[in-house]
Structures are given as C-alpha cells and as structure tokens.
Image (spheres, coloured by chain):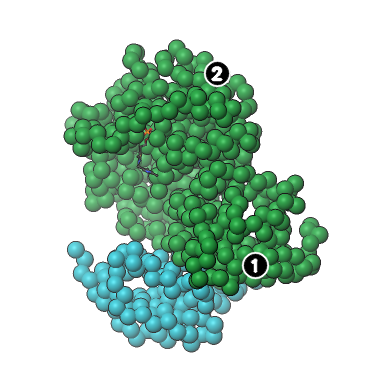
Amino acid sequence: MSDKRGQCISGGEILLEQLLIQGVDTIFGYPGGAIMPAYDCLYDYLDRLRHILVRHEQGAIHAAQGYARTKGVPGFVMVTSGPGATNVITGVADAMIDSTPVVVVAGQVSSTLLGSDAFQETDLIGMTTPVTKWSYQIRRPEDVAWAVARAFYIAGSGRPGPVVLDFTRDAQIGKAEFEPRSCDFIRSYIALPEPSDEAIRQAAEWINAARKPLVVYGQGIILSGAEQALEAFLDKADIPAGSTLLGLSALASDNPHFMGMLGMHGNLAPNIMTQECDLLIAVGMRFDDRVTGNLSTYARNAKIIHIDIDPSEIGKNVPAGLGILGDAKEVLTRLTARIQPRSCPDWAMEPILCNAVEKHKVIDPEIHPESGPLNPGEVIAAVSDRCRGEAVILTDVGQNQMLAARYSRFTRSRSFISSGGLGTMGFGLPAAIGAKIAAPERTVIAFLGDGGIQMTLQELGTIMQEGTGVKIVLLNNNWLGNVRMWQELFFRERYSCTRMLNPDFRGIAEAYGIPCVNVESRDELGPAIERMLAGDGPFILNAHIREESMVFPMIPPGKSVDQIMLNAQDWFEYGD
Amino acid sequence: METESLYEITAYTENQVGLLSAIAGIFTRRSLNIEKLLVYPSKIEGIHKFKILTRASETQIRSVVLQIEKKVDVIKAYYAIDTQRSDQEIEDVKDFLSRREETNR
Ligand SMILES: Cc1ncc(C[n+]2csc(CCOP(=O)(O)OP(=O)(O)O)c2C)c(N)n1
C-alpha cells in the first residue's frame, strides 16, 4: 500500500499515486510546459511507472489503444496542453467509436488563466466532449484522486470508451492530503444493465423455433469476455456465426460454427446467410453501414434479436424485434441454459456453396497465384500460417486492413486490432507498439500500407528507443491502394492524387537501426518471414506487392449484402 | 419520410459543468434546431432539469433521448408531445435514484 496515504503531496504526485492504485504500469506520453509539474513528479516514479516517450502525441494515444485492446485494461496517456492535447483527439475519437478504454491526462494552463487565451490554452473539454465517454477539468489538487478513480471506472466499465482529464497547472503544483480513492458506482450511470428475464425467455422461444438462425457478433464479445459463452451457445444450438471486423479472433478461425467476416469485404457465406436466415441474433455489434450495406433490404427474411450493453444501440440502425439489454456474457450464458439442444440441418447448403465459389474465384487466385507479382493476400496468409494463428495482428487502414482481416487465422481472442469505426490511417504502427508492450510474450505483427505507415512513421523512433519487438510487414504498392481501387471501380479509372513516390524504406529502417529486408519475388518471401520471426527485436519486411491490387469480394456501397462482386467483372449469383 | 412534430424532451441530471454543451452537441450533430431550452433545479434536491423543445421525427427523438441518457451525469431523459407528465417523471426519477442507492449498498 502507498506510504503517501494521509500525506500532503502535490496534485501531480497524487495523480501518480492514484495511477498505481488503478493498476497502471505504462504511460504513453510526451511532455510540455503545462504538464511539466506532473512530469517532474514522474521522475521519482519511473521505477514503478514505465514511460514510453512517443514521437508525436497521436502515437501515444494509438499505442495506448493497442495496449488496451491487447490486455483488456484501460490504456493511459499523458500529454501537454494546446497542441499536445489537440494531437491526441484523432485517437480519442477512434477510441470512442471503437469502444476502447483509454484515459488521457492533458496539461492545462493554470486555472487563473483559463479563458484568457494564455499560451497553449485550448478548450480541450469543449473539443473532446462529443468524442469522449466523460471529460473533466481538474482545477484543485483535492479533486485529483477522485477524478482519476472515476475516469478509470467510466473508461473501463459498461461499454468502454475514452475519458479526458484536463489538468490545470496549478492543480498539479498545489498540495492536498492524499487519500486513495476507488470508484465502482455512479448513481446516474448504469454500467451493467440487468437483462430482462422476459426478454431472455422470449429470445429462447424464437431460437428454438427458428429454422435458419444466424448469429452476428462484434467486439462486444471480446469486451465482455464472452468468448466461451458464445462458443457454448453456438454449440448447443448449432447456429452458424459471422463476425464484424472488430469481433475477429473472438472465435477461433477453425471453429465449425465460424462462417467468416461480415460486410463489405467479408466472406460470401455470412453475408448471403444474412439474407437467407429467418432469425438474426446480433450480439455486441452495432450494425455499422459497412456491415449492413443497404439497410432497407438487410436481413429481409429475418426476425431480429439485438443483444447489447448500450441502450442507445438497440434499434438505432436496424429495428430490433426483440432487444436484450445486458452484458454479452451474462445474456448468452442465460440464453444457453434456456434453449433446446438442436441441430440446424436447413443450413447445410449455403456455406458449402458460398465457400466453394469464394475459394475458386477469390481466395486461390489471391493467395496461390501461379505467376506475376506478389499479392498482398499471399504475403498475409504466409505470415499468418508461419505464426500458426497465434500472433497479435494489427493493421492500418485500407486494403492492407481488409486483406489482413480476410487472410489472418486466429487461435485466441484479442488477436486482431484495427481501427474500425473511424478508419484512422496511421493507427497501425503505434498501436502495434502498445500491443507489444502489453503482451511482450506474444508475436506482434503489423500489416501496414505504404500510405498509412508514413502517417505515423516517426514512431520508428519509439521502437528504436524502447527496442519494441514489433514485426512490421509493409504492403508496399506505391499507391494509396484502397482509394486507387475505388477510383478504378467507381470513378472511371481517374486516378486523382493517389500515386505516391515512396522513400527507400530500407534506408529509413537502417537510420533507425531496425533490420529490414526488401522482398520483390515469391522465392524471397519465405526466407524473409523466417528472418523476421527469428529474433525478438523489431523488423520491417518491405514487400513490393502488385501495384494494382484489389480487394474482393466487395459489396459496393449502397448495395445489399447479397449483391457481391467477385472481381471487377463478375457478380456472385446465389441460387440461380 | 416520417412526420415531424414538436417534442418536449426533459432530462434530469447531476449538477455538472459542461453538461449543457454536451447535450446541445447531440442536437447540433443531427442538425436539430432547439426551439426552446430551460435549465433549472428540479423538485428533487440537487438534481437539475433540462427542458428542451425541438422539432423532429419520433425515431430521431427516441435516439436523441437515448444519447442524452447515455451521458454519464444524466440520470433520466424523457420525451413527449403532451407536457403534462412532470409529476410522474419526478416520481420515476426518485424511484430510480432509490433503487440505485440500494444496488450500491
Ligand atoms: C487519416 C486518414 N486519411 C485518409 C483516409 C482515406 N483512406 C482510406 S484507405 C486510404 C489509402 C491507404 O493507402 P495505403 O496506406 O497505402 O494502404 P493500402 O490501401 O494500399 O493497403 C486512404 C487515403 C483515411 N482512412 N484516414
């Protein structure tokens, strides 16, 4: 227990003491004027709190997100006021839409100067209110322990999310008696709603009566720790399941009920089955438009049960015939107890048919091409195979992301980390740093595009300084690939501003002391992967891939989830 | 298109700085114009009350009310076309708070 209890110490030191009580071991941060008093206190705590000095505050917040999502606890960020604070906002917005628990402490000018346009003063609360679960300005040292305890409770409980604490300089310097605080109750905030018995009974009845039920699940499964509860539920009811992008790895890829990924670049089977099912059971997902396609035709033959912890999600995009408010693990466990053991023979054909077409038309040409340049999917599949599905996979945004989602295999949960809702380019590299720090014993692979890596490239400096063993697989096509693909498909091949002249990435890696190999041909790929995985240190595998790479299947924007392109010419024709 | 009507939204909240702009932001984001706004102490000691008049469809209003209630410091939010339910709401909020106090015991 802290020996500072009952002593009169500065607000900055109270922050650090309270962080230790919250179980924080790592701070991702960057100092500056308005947070210097807290950083000065940190000097005496560096034996207990590891500080990762990033190279840009956006790197700090994404690293904290990667840390949080790998470990399942809130990530922590400390930055200065003004530009330091505004630099984290992209990541805060990302954490909000992807339900990631992070707590950000930003310095602020002294309370006496608030509103005076003082040097590096910004209205951080005003700017972050729409993208935080809670934001609060700490103006007195007496409030520090309370605010920090509350911040961690709010960030990590219920549907997780980001919290911003705006910490004035005078509150860091001023002294107060330190009394450790804990928070697990706020009367106006219900973290864990109690599921209704009646709703669960009704859902069990619908499930027992359904001929073709389908589960669609999202990150809510992982956030709730409901992986086993989901598996047990699917086993007992013999229900097939599709995952959203962020739900990936909640079920092992070889789980017999796992049908693949939903949505725009998902697998054929779960998308087609969405339109064929008579009961859709959605768990811990929010019916994002990249998942649903055209809403008016989505799941048109199905009754819908929506299980979510957030009341504002139920009925938001898709009218739910039955909403069950509650934690995924609890609801699934109670549902499993209520349903009849059964099998679903009516589903025999769909997966077989869809998978055969997808394998023949899409997967084989992508990952086993006979000649020509390297395909991105081929690189991803080779890396994933070599890791036997045990690595933590991070992605940036774009083709690299969709292909990594499609061609990575998973054997355990919390193994796929990607910016879903916001689609933040530049996320992958710093998030991988956070993931590796959270799980040093695991192999951490980041699949990045040549555009995205350059958005936060400076974090190679963090990797160098910390020796973080992140394995970077750069899928280098000299284009902003995903945008180029849309230009090819939907903008009459008018390639407006998407061609990129790239630097010599190996030269850059060398400057940072990070080993790097360029891979240009198929024969070089295997040995390069071996070399990358041989050591514990960081590595960059710069794969020169097909320049005009595409991602299929694709449900074009605005189309129904069964209107699927298999390549630039062919559409999937199911059932004709 | 769903028809739009004038709705009255009421929210019972803790007395916290910043809630007004947090709640106003929910309307701005959906491009909903606030026709009338009142913030005052409710009949329950220490609890503030927001009264907001806005024109929207019922689907939108339902979603707005849920978003308001989602704010950590908001206790309860309601909407209606008729405005004769204040006493019922007060009873409901009191009941909610006493149940919350029980779970915390
Ligand atoms: C910060 C940000 N800016 C712009 C975009 C729009 N965008 C989405 S994908 C993409 C292209 C990404 O290119 P690259 O990083 O090379 O990856 P690739 O698609 O080629 O794998 C762009 C510009 C975005 N998602 N995020």
Nearest to the observer: residue B38 or residue A154: B38
Q: Color of chain A here?
A: green
Q: Amino acid at mark 2?
A: Glu
Q: Are marks 2 and 1 in contact (CB under 8 Å)?
A: no
Element on which disc 2 rests: helix
Which chain's colour is cyan?
Answer: B
Of marks 2 and 1, which one's residue comes earlier in the chain?
1
* Residue B78 point in image, percent of width and height: 39, 75
Q: Which mark is residue A72?
A: none
What's the residue at 33%, 15% (across, down)?
Answer: A372
CA–CA distance in space, label 2 to label 1: 52 Å
A277 to the left or right of A239: left
Q: Chain of mark 1?
A: A
* Residue A209 point in image, percent of width and height: 36, 49
* Residue A84 point in image, percent of width and height: 53, 53
Element on which disc 1 rests: helix
Q: Which residue matches tag 2?
A: A530
Residue A459 placement: quadrant:
top right
In the rendered image, the vertical position of residue A215 relative to residue A574, given as above or below: below
What's the residue at 33%, 25% (across, down)?
Answer: A547
In the rendered image, the vertical position of residue A145 relative to residue A344, given as above or below: below
- Between circles 2 and 1, the one closer to the viewer is 1
Q: Which residue matches tag 1?
A: A171
A117 to the left or right of A169: left
Q: Same chain for the residues at labels 2 and 1, yes or no?
A: yes
State yes or no: Cβ of the residue under disc 2 lies below 8 Å from any atom of ligand 1: no
Residues packed near mark 1 inside 10 Å, few (<14), some (14 to 19) or many (20 plus): many
